[in-house]
Image (cartoon, rainbow, N blue to C red):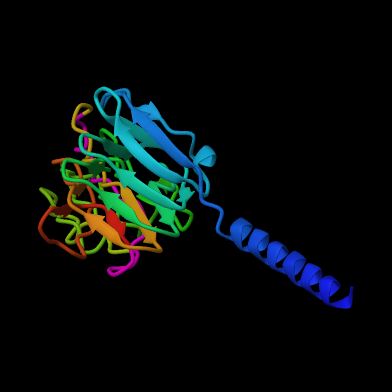
Amino acid sequence: MTQFLKYSLFTLALAVFSFSLFVGQARADVVSVACSGTSGSPTAVTEADLAGDDVTFTDGGDGWCVLDEAISASSVVINTGVTITHTATDVDGVTITTTGIFEIQEGGVINADTKGCQGVANADGTGPDGSNVCGPQAGWGDGNGSDGGYQGAGYGGLGGMGSSSTFILGGATYGSATAPIFLGSSGGGVAGASLNAGGDGGGLVILSIGGIFTHNGTIYLYHSQLFGGFNRNFFGKRWKWYGSYHC
């Protein structure tokens, strides 16, 4: 009887251990997000619904999805034909954190072109403050729009002086050259020219990846042509940006 009780207790303990092990290895939910929007009207993503999941962004039409909050997931895959962007001046930009893999397939895109601080006609440009909120911040890279204007915005380097002879330097440098976390600032508009706004700054992409990063697509963070702010702390094949990017 004693021997039988010992075996019974051992079997029960083993069953409890096996159940605990199974619970500890429970897999994340597999979620597919269909990006059916266009560049002008992208599909809005509900970021909170993806927390802790294995997320795949698929091409559900024209392939565009837009973020306005950070994503924290188990893994993320951006399929061929999909473009992920963020709303202009959004403080989070495209911020994605994974505990596992992150893959951008060939033909997959993260595009934050001109999504930074926006240019203003007949006025100084705007730059981000310490909370990444765009405004006329002194010393944060915004180009001056007075006396000829078109002064370039700064970020990783000083902005160009444009056509102005009064302002020797363009927008000031700010942020980090190795781990940028701020939006790009905008250039100054031409004084007295209501249609000539300064260039919009490049957007923001932050990828924090716990597993393997497979990047066969493209990441864009260009500013607009009229002297928007940029940061170019790294440049390589298929990596093209004039905004803030780090991973």
Residue depicted at x 17% and y 51%: 216
Does residue 3 sit above or below 136 in this rendering?
below
- Give the left or right position of residue 147, taking residue 74 as reference: left
Please state which of residues 199 and 115 is positioned toward the viewer in this rendering. Answer: 115
Q: Is residue 124 above or below residue 140?
A: above
Residue 218 is situated, as x and y percent measured from the top left of the image, at 18, 48
Q: Tell me if residue 183 is in the magenta stretch.
A: yes
Residue 129 position within the rendered picture, expressed as x and y whole percent measured from the top left: 44, 54
Residue 122: x %, y % from top left: 26, 34
Q: Residue at x 36, y 34 (%)?
A: 66
Q: Which residues are magenta?
A: 175-193
Q: Which is more toward the observer, 156 or 112?
A: 112
Q: Is residue 85 above or below residue 161?
A: above
Residue 239, can we see it?
A: yes
In the rendered image, residue 224, in percent from the top left (x then y), is placed at 18, 40
Nearest the viewer among 220 and 80 is 80
Q: Residue at x 47, y 50 (%)?
A: 73
2 with respect to 107 (left or right): right
Q: Nearer the viewer, residue 246 or 177?
A: 246
* Image quarter of the N terminus: bottom right
Is residue 76 on the magenta stretch?
A: no
Image quadrant in which the C terminus is located: bottom left
Q: Residue furthest front?
A: 1
At x 77% / y 72%, what residue is drawn? 7
